[in-house]
Amino acid sequence: MNVLIVYASQFGSTRGIAEHLGEALRTRGVAVSVVSADAASQGNVEPFDAYVVGSAIHGARWLPAAREFVELDRQGPSRRGKLDGKHHDVRRLS
Ligand SMILES: Cc1cc2nc3c(=O)[nH]c(=O)nc-3n(C[C@H](O)[C@H](O)[C@H](O)COP(=O)(O)O)c2cc1C
């Protein structure tokens, strides 16, 4: 299984959590890529089976890059947007 961990971080703490989670999964034999939400939304990702996405919160909302990534996922299994062809059976883990 390949897992994509996507983060949106302004000051680095969310990125740190994403990297820590990636390391934890790798020690359990899971192939993991940790990428920024900007990069993920642009399709700069390897094919993956599932993803985890997290964001810093500003004004009670996720950062725009994280919201954009989730919106791309909501476009459906055909991935009509920039993520087209990058996903296989995407499922949320939480
Ligand atoms: C402008 C601004 C607005 C914030 N608004 C919220 C908020 O509405 N709710 C909250 O729980 N934290 C809020 N925070 C705290 C950030 O979510 C928190 O510092 C976060 O861990 C930063 O993550 P980062 O280091 O990945 O950027 C805000 C921080 C900033 C700078």
Image: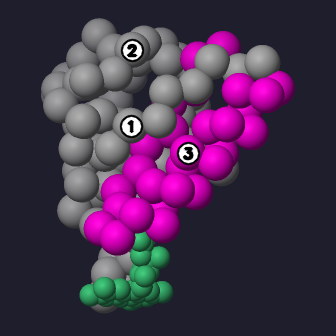
Q: Position of residue 78 (x, y in %)?
A: 31, 18
Q: Which residues are magenta?
A: 1-28
Q: Position of residue 21 (x, y in %)?
A: 65, 45
Q: Amino acid at mark 1?
A: Val
Does the image show residue 7?
yes
Q: Secondary structure at mark 2?
A: loop
Q: Position of residue 22 (x, y in %)?
A: 62, 37
Q: Position of residue 14 (x, y in %)?
A: 47, 62
| Residue occupied by mark 1 | 35
Q: Residue at position x 54%, y 49% from top?
A: 18
Q: Are marks 1 and 2 in contact (CB under 8 Å)?
A: no
Q: Nearer the viewer, residue 93 or 38?
A: 38
Q: Is residue 23 magenta?
A: yes
Q: Residue at position x 29%, y 34% from top?
A: 40
The label on residue 46 is 2
Q: Are marks 3 and 2 in contact (CB under 8 Å)?
A: no
| Residue occupied by mark 3 | 19
Where on the image, by quarter, is ligand 1?
bottom left
